Amino acid sequence: MNNVKHAWRWQEILGHVVFLTGFIGLWEFACARGLLDATFFGRPSGIATFLFEGFVSKPKLWLDLGYTLIGTTASFVLGSLLAILLGLVFVMFPRFERAADPYLTLVNAMPRIALVPLFLLWFGLGLGSKIAVGTSLAFFIVLANTVAGIRGVSGDLLTLTRSLGASPRQLFMQVTLPSAVPVIASGLRLALVYSMLGVVGAEIVAAEHGLGQTLAYMQSTFNMDGVMGLLLVLALLGVLVTSSLTRLERKLLKWQ
Amino acid sequence: MAAIAIQNLTIRFGAHVLAVDDFSLNIHEGEFVSIVGPSGCGKTTVLNQLTGLLPPQQGKISILGKQPREGNPDLAYMLARDCLLPWRTTLENASYGMEIRGAPRSEAEPKARALLAQVGLAGFENNYPKALSHGMRQRCALARTFALKSPILLMDEPFGALDAQTKLTLEDLLLQMWQAERRTVVFITHDLAEAVALSDRVIVMSARPGRIIADVSIPLTRPRSVKALQKSAEFHEIYTHVWEQLERSIQMSGAPPQLVD
């Protein structure tokens, strides 16, 4: 059984290798023959050269990567912390939540990228404005999940714990919080992706450094190899951050 | 002194719904009493009055001479569903009640281990509830309940969700654990056979508004085995007798004949 499964996975990997080699080869071939315009689509060899130069021989891209990562991390941490705190306040004071809800809905409905010009004025061209956009995205996701998680606590568990004479603090620490953690965690995973989205989006509009800024620059100078290379980096980065968070989640929530 | 004394308890939900009507009951220390009735007859509502989880209503309740209050250490409550905390292991769940009631870890842990062994869960101490069957979860809940020092156990249909075979096994386990200590038990169920097999006394309630329509002593000798009783002529005789009494009360009270579902 195990052997069969193993063989299958081997074949899968082989399949992917064959597919990607074929895809890249066809792309390169089409560009070489002039069937595909490399000015618009880039070409694999050019993308590889760009990435090699950017990260190895003239490593300028590390700095941009650093800026984007710092912006993403700061947005994620700040947005999540604020959201969890406000979520707790909401659960403690439901009337406050009802009063605040229409305004939050209104702000959340705003396309966040449209706020970038304003944030640039308020927080400058540097990291500040990027963190503001990322935070504003992460915040609402985590807020909704925090409130849903805490509300979703099992009534039976609360009844049992109250019948044991638990203090409000014990009720919260022993029942409400642990049962909300999985819901909050799935919000955090999504918030991380959106933090990156906000930061890169804001960088594209205007920035001094960052992968988004470089992407916009490559696009305006018609360097399609650069654009494609950076898109690849961003996609890989997204996969990396979410999968590492998923792994952490699985470790922490092994009871699920 | 009665362990539990309920006098003229009347419970209303809102202005119009009369849930429980003029309910009076004395339960002696060490007595195993079942309350049987159709779904929605107010059995659980009465129990929640005892725990103090619902605000006091018309009537008087005394538990070992004291008024009901939330978190009363004289009571150990076991709910219909197993109510294990999914993020705690079997061992941590078994010691949960003691922990909330302030027992030090050094005392709670060995006691939880001993009780888990008693309910047949030795070797499963470090498993999370998701890995346990329904029957095993309810065994763990039994361990958690018996780990408390409370002289009165309130059990709300603890075996209602189990299959017939597992149910018989756990009923016997409960009787065995109870027999050793003889704490007062108030056991809620809608299964008349279960009530007769376990109890010293069976209280039958009518459909809403819940009233007591029969209070029957069960003369079966102790210690009992529910499994053995299944083949006992005496048990079936008593069961039939209670059932007949029930039918008569239904006819007299005019309640719809749907007592056991």
Image: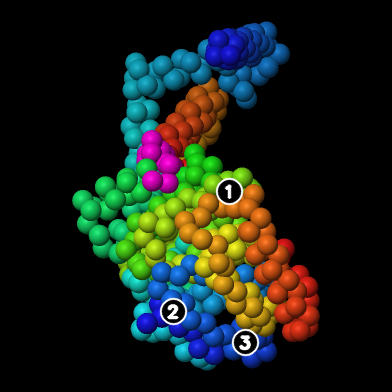
Question: Which tag is nearer the camera, tag 2 or tag 3?
Answer: 2
Pointer 1 with pointer 3, Cβ within 8 A: no
Pointer 2 with pointer 3, Cβ within 8 A: no
Subunit under mark 2: B
Sequence-first tag of 2 and 3: 2
Image position of B253 (left or right of B105):
right
Question: Which tag is nearer the camera, tag 1 or tag 3?
Answer: 1
**Circle 3 sits on which residue?**
B21
SS class, disc 3: strand
Question: In this view of the protein, can residue A192 be seen by the observer?
Answer: no
Classed neighbour count for the residue bearing mark 3: other residues with Cα under 10 Å, few (<14), some (14–19), many (≥20) = some
Indicate the position of residue A55 as horizontal and vertical percent values. 37, 21
Asked whether residue B226 is drawn in magenta, I would say no
**Circle 2 sits on which residue?**
B4
Indicate the position of residue A77 as horizontal and vertical percent values. 36, 50
Quadrant where the N terminus of chain A sits is: top right
Tell me the kind of residue under disc 1: Lys
Q: Which mark is residue B227?
A: 1
Same chain? Circles 2 and 3: yes
Indicate the position of residue B186 as horizontal and vertical percent values. 49, 69
